[in-house]
Amino acid sequence: RKQATEYSTSSSDEEFESKPSLKHKAKRALRKRRKLEKETKQLIKQEELKRLHKAQAVQRQLEELEERQRALEIFGVELERELRGEADSGTKDENQMLHEWFELVMEKNKLMHYESELLIIAQELELEDHQSRLEQKLREKMAIDGKSKRIVCSSAQGQTMP
C-alpha cells in the first residue's frame, strides 16, 4: 500500500509539474509566433519600399524619355521641312539630311522600345504590389480562422470537462 500511495503521489506531482511546463511552452510559442509575425511585417514593408523606389525610378525614366521624344519630334519636323525644301538647309546636302533623318528614326524607335520595357516593368511592379496585398489579406484571414478555431476548441473543451 505504501508503494501505491507513493506512486499516486509521484504521478500527481508529475502532472502538477507538467502543467506549468505546458503553459510556459505555450507562452514561448506565442512569443515566437509574434516575433515571426513582426519580422514578416518588416520584410513586407522593406519589399514594399523597394517596389516604391523602383516605381519612382521608372516614373522618372519615363518622364525623361518623354522629354527626349519631344525634342526628337521637334528636330524631326525641322529636318523634314529642310528635306522638302520648305526651310533653309544651309550648307547641308540632301544625303547628309537623309542620313540624319534615318538616325533620328532609329533613335525614336529605340526610345519607343525602351518606353515599352519601362511600361512592362511598371506593370510588373503593380502586379507584385497587388500580389503582396493579396498575400497579406490571406495571412490575416488565416490568422483570424486560426484564432476562431482555437476559441471554438477551447470552448468545446470547457463544455465537455466538468
Image (spheres, grey):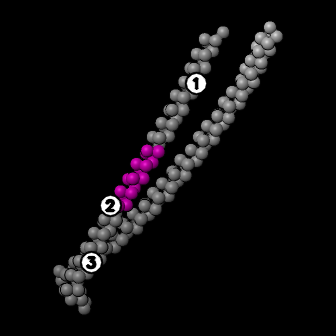
Is residue 71 found left or right of 143 in the rendered image?
Answer: left
Residue extending farthest to the right is 2
Element at label 2: helix
Label at residue 103: 3
Is residue 48 found left or right of 110 in the rendered image?
Answer: right
Was residue 122 drawn as part of the magenta stretch in this picture? Answer: yes
Is residue 43 found left or right of 18 in the rendered image?
Answer: left
Seen from the viewer's position, the closer of residues 9 and 145 is: 9
Label at residue 150: 1
Q: Give the residue type at disc 2.
A: Ser
> Which label's residue is closer to the chain start, 1 or 3?
3
Tell us which disc is closer to us: 2 or 1: 1
Tell me how far mark 3 sits from mark 2, CA to CA. 20 Å
Residue carrying label 2? 116
Q: Which range is magenta?
A: 116-132
Q: Give the residue type at disc 1.
A: Arg
Q: Position of residue 86 (x, y in %)?
A: 19, 81
The C terminus: image quadrant? top right
Was residue 71 drawn as part of the magenta stretch in this picture? Answer: no
Image quarter of residue 147:
top right
Label at residue 83: none
Residue extending farthest to the top is 1
Element at label 3: helix
Q: Position of residue 49 (x, y in %)?
A: 52, 53
Q: Residue at x 19, y 86 (%)?
A: 94
